[in-house]
Image (cartoon, rainbow, N blue to C red):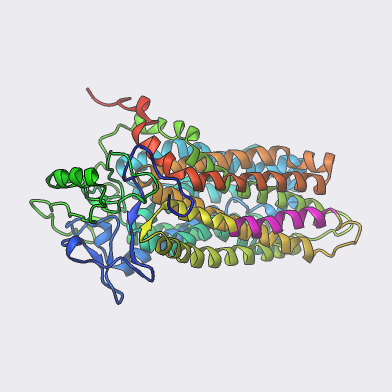
Amino acid sequence: MGLGILESRSLEHVPGTTRYYDDPNRPQVANGADHGLKVDASGKLPIILIPQPSDDPNDPLNWPLWRRDLITFTLSMAAIFATALGPILAANTVVLSLWFGESLTKTAMLTGYFLLGVGGAAIFFVPSGRVWGKRHLFILGLIILVGSAAWGGAVGTNYKSFIGARVIQGVGCSPYETLVNVAVGDLYPVHQRGIRMAFTNLAVFGGAFFTPILVGKITGTIGWEWTFYFTSIFLALSLVAVVLFCPETAFRRDMSLNIDMVTIDTPAPVGRASPSSEGQNDPSGSEDVEKLHQTGEQPAPVIRPAAGPAVIPPKKTWVQSLALFDGRKTDDSYFELLLRPFPLFLQPAFFWGCLIQGTMIGWTVFIGVIVAATLLMPPFFWSEVEAGYAYAAPFIGALCGFAIAGLFSDWSAKYMTSLNGGIYEPEFRILMVFPMFIIGGIGLFGFALTSGELITGKYAWPVPLTFFAFEVAGMVIGAVASSLYIVDAYRDLAIEGFTCMAIFKNFLGFGLTFSAYDWIIQSGPRTVMLAISIVQVVVCATSIPMYIYGKRVRAYYHKHDLLRWTKGIGRRR
């Protein structure tokens, strides 16, 4: 048992577990036993790359780091503008309620319809990303967003038309909510993912909090319609950038190069850490391994690289990289993959990821409703400009959450791995839930105790907004924790995992917008937020058994395929 993580009783090496560090103070150094493995030699000491790049120059892992970072930055900027359409109505709740002549609940539902579009489209888009890659979806999403954002600004007083625009906007946003984080797994080995995953999560979930600040000012100056027109313009610029600078990131790599995904199908000795040699399933060494098991000795860590391709393809030209498609990425059928996310809701790790990421995002919807219901109403009567400025606090919280997650994710993984004798376990990523619990808990309970007292004058308005910032910081940290764990522990199911999380959080958000105003009016902000805070404590507490039993869960579902009933559906005979 390593650092509280229970070893598998059925697999000696569990997919996701890797020898990542060789020395307590530095990454694993390539040595004679690892001859032939590719390494990152940019630092003082070479770091073994997990997964191993192929010999194909078109493999994204072989691209220069600056090019991969440019792709990540471009997709993140596009994601900011795409997800900005979600909270774009936050500062305009009262304005739009009066404009359309609808109740506050129906106005809040306009955000819910956007979330419904995101979650519903993810079901159909993500299998396409698995089969044909992600580039065509990123481009298609932006095309949809450019048109639907302009549509949103041109609806006049037609509420039903606005509902249609909001749903279609959600559809266009879906590839960016579900696939940007997966692209990080395509572009970087394990040791380079932490800070990049934090950045993409800031773009997808945190950058949207800057939107109401601008929206309030634009609405007060030239009208709410221009918030959609400006978004459409920036989305069009993003479309050009993605077309020119973001080639396909999905790559069909030989499975033998995924040295973190192989297994040794023999029981691990009780009380001992699992071997770190990802390549020990090589037939040439089977007799030696059997002999070592008989004597009780620990096998030496030997990793053998996969043989390279017989013919190395030529490097694609820049023009060739602009193609929407460059071949199938899997032999699985689209319809088989369409059904794959749904059984994963029954898998503890994926359900945990949905809870950790989805609930905190859902609570921001509730807090936004309370902010609008309190500060835009008597006795405050804030204008849309002032309501927009109120979101400066959560935006700062998002930046702080990004900084904490970016620094803590890589540091904690390195530190825990060094304590574990150089063996990296994906469950180390779950430790990031602890700062999420502390910071997010302060935000939720603090907002619960202070927001209801604004009207009485007991607390000034900056107090609950400060706690709002804490909640958003916790939300970003939790999103990074769940994303990194799914990518590192279940990289072969990462796309389906992010689909599950997108469906869960967006449908939860839709449900919350449907009932938020009525619940707050009936029970009051204090009661509602205290209930939410307690629920979040329970959600965070599920991380304890997930950390302890996560490795056994990985082993169990590796041997008992939860997706077996979907296999063969829609496949050509």
Q: Is residue 227 visible?
A: no
The residue positioned farthest toward the top in the image shown: 573
The residue positioned farthest toward the front in the image shown: 295
User: Percent from the top left, x then y, of residue 52?
Assistant: 25, 56
- Which residue is rendered at x = 20% and y = 66% of the image? 31
- Examine the image and state in which quarter residue 7 appears: top left
- Which residue is rendered at x = 54% and y = 44% of the image? 545
The residue positioned farthest toward the bottom in the image shown: 44
Q: Is residue 410 visible?
A: yes
Write down the region rendered in magenta: 435-452
Which of 315 and 424 lies nearest the eye of the viewer?
A: 424
Above or below, comparing residue 52 to residue 10 in the picture: below
- Which residue is rendered at x = 81% and y = 55% of the image? 449
- Which residue is rendered at x = 46% and y = 58% of the image? 78
> Is 37 in the magenta?
no
User: Percent from the top left, x then y, of residue 136?
Assistant: 35, 47
